[in-house]
Image: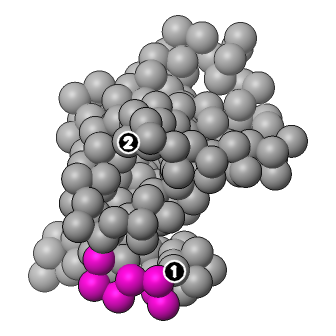
Amino acid sequence: MLRNLYDWTLKKAQSPASEKWLGAISFAESSFFPIPIDMMLIPMILADRLKAWRLATITTITSVLGGIAGYLIGMFLFEAIGRPIIDFYGYGPQFEAFQGYYTDYGILIVLIAGFTPIPFKVITIASGVVGLNPLTFIAAAIPARGARFYLVAALLWKFGDPIRDFIERRLGLVTTAFMVLGILGFIALKYL
């Protein structure tokens, strides 16, 4: 099933309405769709590197809007829709413990998850379940998702096709390293 969705996503990246599909799939990916939007964004940027910033902008805006939909799923439809999505990703057992961290670290969790390969839909749904302030959620989601998609766009714009394999294989490592450095910076500012 996942392979079929992946192939379908790549076909949409090559269609005449690819930017509309990019927005729609980016929206869905932040709330329920299992294929990472990078799989569509990367070939679209490589096809026309001059559109890199436009495509990153479309992806960022629609991803945040999809995150709001995920938040609403968590807030109002958790048992009917949210729990099956969480269970699909195998996060059911950890989800209960994870909710406790939101009280102290909600904004940091959204920032980290929005930038790293952690499935963002899990965080959006969790944010709604625990009732994270919606404005806080949106304020964290915009820079986190934007940073992720603009990083991909910048690397592809600058280096083109040679960087594609690196991004597809090591994007998680690179974004996690940047996020760890950011967290260490926040900690240093707080305690120094």
- Residue depicted at 71% across the width and 31% down the height: 85
Element under label 2?
helix
Q: Which quadrant is home to the C terminus? A: bottom left
The percent position of residue 19, horizontal first and vertical second, equals 38, 42
The magenta stretch is 157-163
List the residue tagged with mark 1.
164
Task: Provide the residue designation for mark 2.
Answer: 19
Q: Position of residue 111 (x, y in %)?
A: 35, 54
Closer mark to the observer between disc 2 and disc 1: 2
Q: Amino acid at mark 2?
A: Glu
Residue at 79%, 35% in the rendered image: 87
Q: Return the residue nearer the eye: 84 or 145.
A: 145
- The amino acid pointed to by label 1 is Arg
In screen coordinates, is 179 left or right of 97? left
Quarter of the view holding residue 96: top right
Is residue 119 found inside the magenta-colored segment of the image?
Answer: no
Depth check: give the residue in front, 154 or 50.
50
